[in-house]
Image (cartoon, helix red, strand yellow):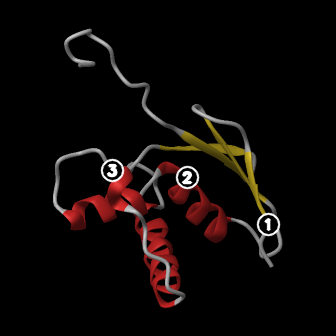
């Protein structure tokens, strides 16, 4: 229906400031200079979440793709990439603030 009406969805972006530099992420983004480290951190976080019993709800992924790809999309949202970068790019105890173009500012604390 959107194609027929020539409508396009606004892409989601997430920003995080680390060391006075703005870092911008989109879903599944591999353009960041620390992508390898970010995805390694995401993998560790994903494993910890699964051990704790978390399983993402793939019903919200509206693409007609296999279940495994739906999970990958959910685990590589721009917010998660920004949070992973914040975890590896800031000292322990530093608040992690991310901003999205589609919603308000999110603040995460960690110990």
The label number, if any, that marks residue 79 in the structure image: 2
Give the residue drawn at x 27%, y 18%: 2
Q: Tag 3 or tag 1, which sits nearer the N-term?
A: 3
Q: Mark 1 points at which residue?
A: 109
Q: Tell me how far mark 2 sits from mark 1, CA to CA.
A: 14 Å
Q: Residues within 10 Å of mark 2 (few under 14, many from 20)?
A: many
Local packing at callout 3 (Cα closer than 10 Å; few below 14, some 14-19, many 20+) is some
Q: Bin the neighbour count of mark 1 within 10 Å (Cα to Cα): few under 14, some 14-19, many 20 and up.
A: few
Q: Of callouts 2 and 1, which one flags the residue occurring earlier in the amino acid sequence? A: 2
Visible residue check, residue 3: yes
The quarter of the picture where residue 23 lies is top right
Residue 20 relative to residue 58: left or right: right
Q: Are marks 1 and 3 in contact (CB under 8 Å)?
A: no
Residue 81 percent location from the top left of the image: 51, 58
Specify the quadrant that holds the N terminus. top left
Secondary structure of residue under mark 2: helix
Numbered disc 1: secondary structure:
loop
Mark 1 vs mark 3, foreground winner is 3
Give how far across and how far down residue 55 sits, in percent: 43, 75
Residue 62 place in picture, x, y as percent? 29, 45
- Residue hosting label 3: 61
Q: Distance between the residues labelled 1 and 3?
A: 28 Å
The reply to whether residue 28 is visible in this rendering is: no
Between the C-alphas of marks 2 and 3, the distance is 16 Å
21 is higher (above) or lower (below) than 1: below
Q: Could you tell which of marks 2 and 3 lies nearer the N-terminus?
A: 3
> Residue at horizontal 78%, vertical 76%?
92
Residue at horizontal 23 percent and vertical 45 percent from the top? 63
Q: Is residue 71 left or right of residue 63?
A: right
């Amino acid at each position: 229906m959107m194609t027929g009406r020539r409508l396009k969805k606004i892409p989601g972006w997430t920003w995080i400031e680390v060391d006075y530099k703005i870092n911008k992420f989109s879903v599944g983004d591999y353009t960041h200079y620390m992508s390898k480290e970010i995805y390694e951190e995401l993998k560790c976080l994903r494993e910890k979440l699964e051990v704790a019993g978390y399983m993402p709800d793939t019903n919200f992924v509206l693409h007609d793709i296999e279940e495994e790809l739906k999970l990958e999309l959910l685990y590589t949202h721009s917010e998660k990439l920004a949070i992973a970068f914040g975890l590896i790019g800031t000292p322990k105890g530093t608040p992690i603030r991310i901003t999205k173009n589609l919603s308000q500012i999110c603040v995460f604390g960690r110990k």
